[in-house]
Every structure is written in C-alpha cells, then in structure tokens.
Image (tube, rainbow, N blue to C red):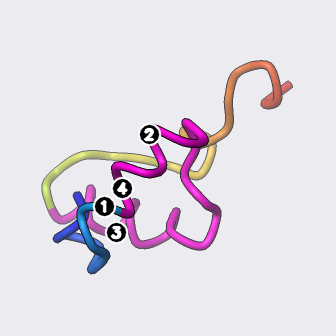
Amino acid sequence: MARDIGVPDVTVRQWRNRSRSIPVRYWAAIIDAAKDRGVALSYQDFIPPAEAE
C-alpha cells in the first residue's frame, strides 16, 4: 500500500503500530489506489463503527 500511495513503508507500519488509524490526509490516495486494484473503498470504511453512527 505504501508504494501505491507514495509514502515510505515505515509510514504505513507506524499507522498500524502507533495509532491503529490512518490519517485523514491519506484517505483519498488510498481510495484511489484501491480502485486501481479493483477494490471499492469509501470514506465510510475509514471510520470505526462506534463513530459512524
């Protein structure tokens, strides 16, 4: 994913290891990269279920 959105691998690992969340500024790039790979994502997919309601 890091390569697909143009960030260092360590950046993606930090999201997982530190905060378990992806900063909002990367959401659009991830959605676009997923689309290029045939995966449908939306902004709603980034919001934890407890916060989505």
Start-end of magenta stretch:
11-36
The residue sitting at 50% across, 69% down in the picture is 26
The residue sitting at 27% across, 72% down in the picture is 8
Residue at which label 4 appears: 12
Three-letter code, disc 1: Val
CA gap, disc 2 to disc 1?
10 Å
SS category of the residue bearing label 4: helix
Residue at which label 2 appears: 16
The residue sitting at 60% across, 73% down in the picture is 25
Left or right for 41, reference 6: right
Three-letter code, disc 2: Arg
Three-letter code, disc 3: Asp
Residue at which label 1 appears: 10
Residue at which label 3 appears: 32
- On whether residue 16 falls in the magenta region, the answer is yes
Q: Earlier in the sequence, mark 2 or mark 3?
A: 2
Q: Are marks 4 and 2 in contact (CB under 8 Å)?
A: yes
